[in-house]
Image (cartoon, rainbow, N blue to C red):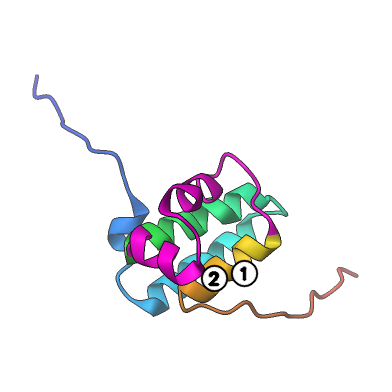
Amino acid sequence: MVKTKTTRYDVAEHLRTPEEMAAYLEACLEEANGDVAFIAKALGDIARAKGMSQVARDAGLSRESLYKALSGERSPGFDTILRVIGALGLKLHAGVVQANP
């Protein structure tokens, strides 16, 4: 029997362009259902793709605190989320949710 070798999937390895990063964040925002830790983890994936050290510098945070905030194990403050989104070169957009009849 042949053994199949698998490796852990890391989405950060597949986020190469700003457009891919924005699309990934958009999809995660839609799937999050209000789970801030899930959104923080998605931002962490994007930050790792872009370079955690540079994102930390641009956000005015230490690299260690950025890793903790975006680990998905906690819910960072909205100010941290906004600083990271800005450091990633992304923007949040508001839209209207259509009510179900």
Q: Is residue 12 magenta?
A: no
Identify the secondary structure beneath mark 1. helix
The residue lying at 34 percent from left, 66 percent from top is: 50
**Residue 22: x percent and y percent?**
48, 74
For disc 2, the neighbor class at 10 Å (few under 14, some 14 to 19, many from 20) is some
What segment carries the magenta color?
51-77
Total labels: the figure holds: 2
- Which residue is found at the position 8% from the left and 24% from the top? 2
Please, what is the three-letter code of the amino acid marked with disc 1?
Leu
In the rendered image, residue 30, in percent from the top left (x then y), is placed at: 63, 63
Marking on residue 69? none
Tell which of 82 and 23 is nearer to you: 82
Residue type at mark 2 is Ile
Q: Answer with the quarter of the image where residue 83 lies.
A: bottom right
Q: Which mark is residue 82?
A: 1
Identify the residue at the far top of this view: 1
Q: CA distance from mark 2 to mark 1?
A: 5 Å
**Residue under numbered circle 2:** 85
Measuring from the top left, give residue 79's x and y in whole percent.
67, 64
Quarter location, residue 47: bottom left
Residue 37 in the image: state x and y as whole percent.
62, 48
The quarter of the rendered structure image containing the C terminus is: bottom right
Vertical relation: 33 (above or below) 57 = above
Residue 78 falls in image quadrant = bottom right
Q: Which residue sits at x=34%, y=57%?
A: 12
Can residue 3 be seen here? yes
Relative to 21, residue 41 above or below? above
**Is 50 left, or right, of 43 in this rendering?**
left
Taking the image as drawn, is residue 26 in sight? no
Query: Is residue 96 left or right of 63 when viewed as pictured?
Result: right
**Image point (51%, 77%), residue name:** 90
